[in-house]
Every structure is written in C-alpha cells, then in structure tokens.
Image (cartoon, grey):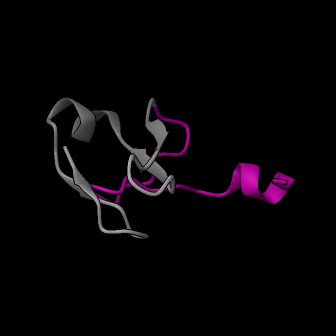
Amino acid sequence: MSSASDERREHTCISCGINISGTSAAKFDCPECGALIYRCAKCRKQSNLYECPDCGFMGP
C-alpha cells in the first residue's frame, strides 16, 4: 500500500541520475526481478544502458 508521501517522492533516472519528477519519464518493472525502474525521455531515446539496482539486470 503506497502512502501520500510515496506519491510525492522524487525519482531519478536510473541511467543518468537526473530528477525526473514532473517529466515525461518512463516507469516500468525490471524484466528480471520486477523492481521498479525509472528512465528519463532522453536516455530512453538514446537507448542508454541501465542496470537494475536489485538484481543487476542490464538493458538498453
């Protein structure tokens, strides 16, 4: 169950580390373990690599 504070928490792009709150970022589950991943539009467009902090899965 998520709280109101979880909804307002700032999120960062897993590839470049910028704050993505209020941007057109993607939020998706890690294909390997299901952990929540956030990526900014620029990193998605450039297919920058990311690594899941929970399981180490690497994706474009």
For the C terminus, the image quarter is top left
> Magenta stretch mostly in which secondary structure?
loop
Taking depth in this image into account, of 50 and 54 the one nearest to the observer is 54
Residue 43, image quadrant: top left
Q: Is residue 4 magenta?
A: yes
Q: Position of residue 58 (x, y in %)?
A: 23, 57
| Residue found at x 43% / y 35% | 25
Q: Position of residue 11 (x, y in %)?
A: 52, 55
Image check: 48 left or right of 26? left
| Residue found at x 18% / y 51% | 49
Image check: 50 left or right of 40? left
Does 39 appear above or below 18?
Answer: above
| Residue found at x 44% / y 35% | 26
Image check: 56 left or right of 32? left
Q: Position of residue 14 (x, y in %)?
A: 35, 57
Image check: 17 left or right of 33? left
| Residue found at x 29% / y 60% | 57
For the N terminus, the image quarter is bottom right
Q: Position of residue 27 (x, y in %)?
A: 49, 40
Does 17 appear above or below 30?
Answer: below
Residue span colored magenta: 1-23
Total marks drawn?
A: 0
Taking depth in this image into account, of 18 and 28 the one nearest to the observer is 28
